[in-house]
Amino acid sequence: MAKEIAIGKRAKISEAQQYMLLSVLGAAIFLGIAISLISHFVQQISFNTKVIMEEEKAIVAYSNVIKSTGICKSPRGTIYSDDELKKCDPDAIEVSEIPGTLRANILEKLASNEALNSVPKEDDSNCINPETKKNFTYKELNKIYQDADSANELKSASQLIKSCSALRVIPDALPAFKNEEALLASLNKLFIVSGWEPESLSPSGSSSSPSSSSSLNTISVRLSVEASSSTTMTVLHNIERSIREFNIERASIEWGGDNSLILQAQATAYYTNEASITETNKTISPEGK
């Protein structure tokens, strides 16, 4: 009887141990799952936080580009709201509302540059002040811009400044794209103004892209002039005075027949790449990925 009781107690103890082991195993499994889920959620929260932070940086950078160029008025806060961007109309903004921006500097400082404005106009029929019968001065152009009341008037005044102020010279002085035909036309005009007409004109066929330290592209041009000494010197003088830069790198001058002067030269003209905003992409990965 005592033996049977001992066996029963031992069986109960063994059964209790099994339940305890199963409970501990279940608790360990549950704890492991909980830790794994917590770790996963922490990683998700960390990754989403990184995405939100980078998104905020992109929005701030985008707003700074708009603000610094003067496309829109400055935002009420640090960044532009959707409503502010929808209401933004560049043609309806006065320069006084965007001080210090790229657009304001162009319309105020560059457009009033006296040295650039001294370059003769090809066709000034649209730039004649009907009251004075003379070309618009920058002061008069600026007054037209300041007195504009509607968006259409501001747009018209802005276009008048571009075509009648010193700004009109910029595309001729440093074009924003490669155009060999326009280059040769400019050079041909210099020859004609100098009283000499070339038999033919052609680029040398070589050009280069900008180096890492410069944004200028180059076009090589071969010059060949055979005329009287005074005409040849006039050609060189007008090339030197040209608003379009012709950098003579190599040249040879010799006397020809009938007391003529023969000039052979290799020159370089310049153009720049059209300005644009570069869009960048950034990949964000979770920790350890």
Image (spheres, rainbow, N blue to C red):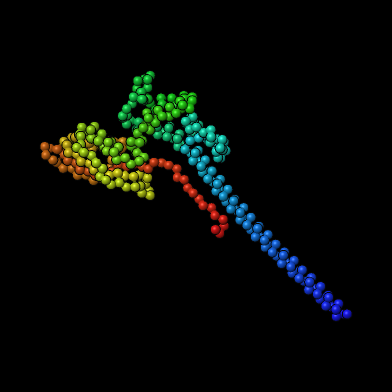
Does residue 42 sit above or below 10 in this rendering?
above
Q: Quadrant of residue 40?
A: bottom right
Q: Quadrant of residue 125?
A: top left
Q: Nearer the viewer, residue 200 or 2?
A: 2
- Residue ranking furthest to the left: 258
> What residue is shown at x 37% (from left), y 45% (from top)?
215
> What residue is shown at x 32% (from left), y 29% (from top)?
121
Q: Is residue 41 left or right of residue 258?
A: right
Q: Nearer the viewer, residue 83 or 135?
A: 83
> What residue is shown at x 25% (from left), y 34% (from top)?
189
Q: Name the quadrant of the C terminus.
A: bottom right
Q: Nearer the viewer, residue 48 or 135?
A: 48
Does residue 221 sit above or below 136 in this rendering?
below
Q: Is residue 117 left or right of residue 195?
A: right
Q: Is residue 78 left or right of residue 140?
A: right
Asked if residue 213 can be seen in this view, the reply is: yes
Image coords of residue 212 (percent x, y): 38, 49
Asked if residue 113 can be seen in this view, the reply is: no
Image coords of residue 83 (percent x, y): 56, 35
- Residue ranking furthest to the top: 131
Image coords of residue 230 (percent x, y): 18, 35
